[in-house]
Amino acid sequence: MPHFKTTRRAAHSAEDMFALVAAVEDYPEFLPLCESTRVDGREFRGGREIIIAEMTVAYKVIRETFTSRAVFDRENLKIDVDYLHGPFRHLENRWSFTPAGARACTIHFAIDYEFRTRALSLVMGTMFDKAFRKFAEAFEARADAVYGR
């Protein structure tokens, strides 16, 4: 099963970086391969925001839509995303943001995924792997655009 994990230092506060990742509706503006997003449900439970969101990713003629459940734990600066349905057998990603001074943080990002079929993995695997490896960079670039350097 493909897995990617990275730790990066960002020149933005942990709270600002958390807010960018939690703004799912903005992903099509900057996230690689993300064509559209839609939040299908939102609730607050135990101090956490929980959303059900649909994301459509596209590359040339390939287009896939999947649905995930994201739990935003603002107090602990953590985001957990679990797959509900779509082209994967398994998909989960985890974000955490550790403050590193007033205007900096360390971002921890990990993703595990497996496509539902071998054929889909062969067609989309390399493309998804490259995109997932650029996620943290894309959020940092977005932070620079939104919050300045």
Image: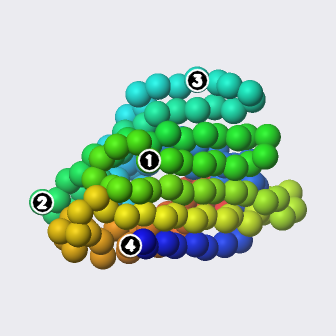
Amino acid type of the residue tagged 1 in the rendering = Tyr
Residue that appears at 24% across and 51% down: 64
In this rendered view, identify the residue nearer to me: 86 or 141: 86
Amino acid type of the residue tagged 4 in the rendering = Asp
Specify which label sits upstream in the sequence, 1 or 2: 2
In the rendering, which numbered label is found on residue 43? 3
Quote the CA–CA distance across marks 4 and 1. 17 Å
Label 3 neighbourhood size at 10 Å, few (<14), some (14-19), many (20+)? few
Label 4 neighbourhood size at 10 Å, few (<14), some (14-19), many (20+)? some
Residue 84: image quadrant is top left
Residue 120 spot, x, y in % from top left: 21, 65
Specify which label sits upstream in the sequence, 3 or 2: 3
In the rendering, which numbered label is found on residue 118? none
Label 1 neighbourhood size at 10 Å, few (<14), some (14-19), many (20+)? some
Residue 17 spot, x, y in % from top left: 66, 53
Disc 2: which residue: 61
Quote the CA–CA distance across marks 4 and 3. 31 Å
Disc 4: which residue: 129
Question: Considering the numbered disc 4 on the image, is that residue within a helix, a strand or a loop?
Answer: helix
Label 2 neighbourhood size at 10 Å, few (<14), some (14-19), many (20+)? few
Disc 1: which residue: 83
Is residue 138 rendered to the left or right of residue 17? left
